[in-house]
Amino acid sequence: MIEYLISPEFLLMMAKIVGIFGGVMGSLAYLTWLERKVMARVQMRPGPTRVGPFGLLQPIADGLKFLFKEDIIPTQANKFLFILAPIVALIPALLSFSVIPFGPRLQVADLSVGLLFIFAITSLGVYGIVLGGWASNSKYPLMGAMRSSAQMISYELSLTLSVVGVLMIANTLSLGELVTAQQGTWFGFIPRWNIFLQPVAFVIYVVSAIAETNRLPFDLAESEQELVGGWHTEYSSMKFAMFMLAEYANMLTVSALATILFLGGWTGPAFGPDWLRMVLPTIWFVGKISVFIFFYVLLRSTLPRFRYDQLMKFSWKVLLPLALANILITSLIVAIS
Amino acid sequence: MLQDWAPVLVFLILVTGFAVVSVVMSYVMGVKKPNSRKLAPYECGMQPTGTARERFSVKFYLVAMLFLLFDIEAVFLFPWAVVYRDLRIFGFLEMLLFIAAILAGYIYVWKKGALEWER
């Protein structure tokens, strides 16, 4: 046992875990900064500028502020569940990063069922929302939680079904193998990304992913004008921050998954000296994720919100049959070839 | 096989520790000046009326049931898709039957009006 604890493999594993955890937490903090800055620019405001150059220290100031704010637990609330809910929301959101390959070897664990693991873990996130909304014992959070859970399970269907087409082509559930299967090019210049083989699945995935993470135009769960703040109306201080952290982490996860499944993960042209070849895959991966994040923020700052019946209709009557048809057509083509 | 999961377990412990520590830290470090208004459920500044433990629309239950049905289908499709190339035309025909059965159920649900939210 002791020998294992000082063995190189174990130390490497710990280094990876700490590195990825730190990297993810740092980028989550700066995601809030990026979102505020981009949205401000879209609305012709400067955004945060006061704390540090370009407001770059804003996330740190925000984190400290959250820590020192009053921790309010309403008297009517179910105390145990009220405290448990943000923890339940945050753990699965962060845990999914343990199987995401950030580079050829920069992955905590390459599970043979990595994709299933991510789907299983992220779908647990809805418990945090439902528990939080119910335990608050207040009307707005309850309504937000009900809406959110119905929305998330509806869109989870099309999300999981859209991936089946990719699995038929790649024949693996391991995220590392999914990426390596997309290495190389067609005709020398088109990268072998699944997006060119599964364009419909890609669109279904991206739309359902936005709905899964409760982002505009699908943020019915916390539509400010009707529900104040949705399921986290009663939350304050660090617990509120944890819900926000979980939401941004989920955003990062679905973007990373979209990159891995459809855009070739960390694959990309490698050039230059050895040290550059080492870090380039990670840079490609982060770059592709950033495109998604930027797209999310632009959506949020430009599109109005759906109506709830439109939202449910869109999921059940458009995305679900489309995903099924995509599976049928893909299976037919794969069977013939 | 099981060793692959060891890093995930370590990650889980780290993440859980982070979540619990942040809750405890904010409890310890935050100011505490509670009053009855602050601890009342938020209702846009009005005096809270009634209870939040109301019954809610049956439509939410319906969505949950439909989700279960179709999610089971999705779960069946995953292993099928992974070994699809080995199954060849047999796998295709088998799954055609399965999807046809699901599609029949889907059309029935649609015609019954279970997917209409505004009713």
Image (cartoon, coloured by chain):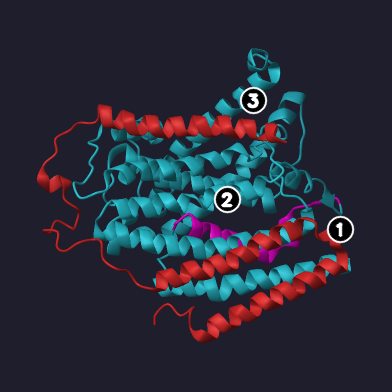
Q: Taking the image as drawn, is residue A255 in sight?
A: yes
**Residue under label 2:** A120
The quadrant in which the C terminus of chain A is found is: bottom right
SS at circle 3: helix
Residue extending farthest bottom: B111
Q: Nearer the viewer, residue A96 or A196?
A: A96
Residue A259 image position (x, y, % from top left): 64, 49
Amino acid on which the number 3 mark rests in the picture:
Met
Q: Nearer the viewer, residue B118 or A35?
A: B118
Q: Is residue A129 above or below residue A207?
A: above
Q: Which quarter of the figure has residue B11?
A: top right
**Residue under label 3:** A13
- Output the letter for the chain in cyan: A
SS at circle 1: helix
Residue extending farthest right: A337
Q: Nearer the viewer, residue A96 or A187?
A: A96
Residue occupying the point 62% across, 31% down: B7
Amino acid on which the number 2 mark rests in the picture:
Ala
Q: Looking at the image, is mark 2 or mark 3 nearer the viewer?
A: 2
**Label 2 marks which chain's residue?**
A
- Upstream in the sequence, badge 2 or badge 3? 3
Residue B16 image position (x, y, % from top left): 46, 34
**Majority secondary structure in the magenta region:** helix
- Output the letter for the chain in red: B
Residue occupying the point 78% across, 57% down: A169
Q: How far apart, in angstroms, are the residues tagged by discs 1 and 2?
A: 26 Å
**Residue under label 1:** B86
Q: Nearer the viewer, residue A285 or A40?
A: A285
Amino acid on which the number 1 mark rests in the picture:
Asp
**Label 3 marks which chain's residue?**
A
Label 3 environment density (alpha carbons within 10 Å; few <14, some 14–19, many ≥20): some
Image: magenta residue range: A188-215
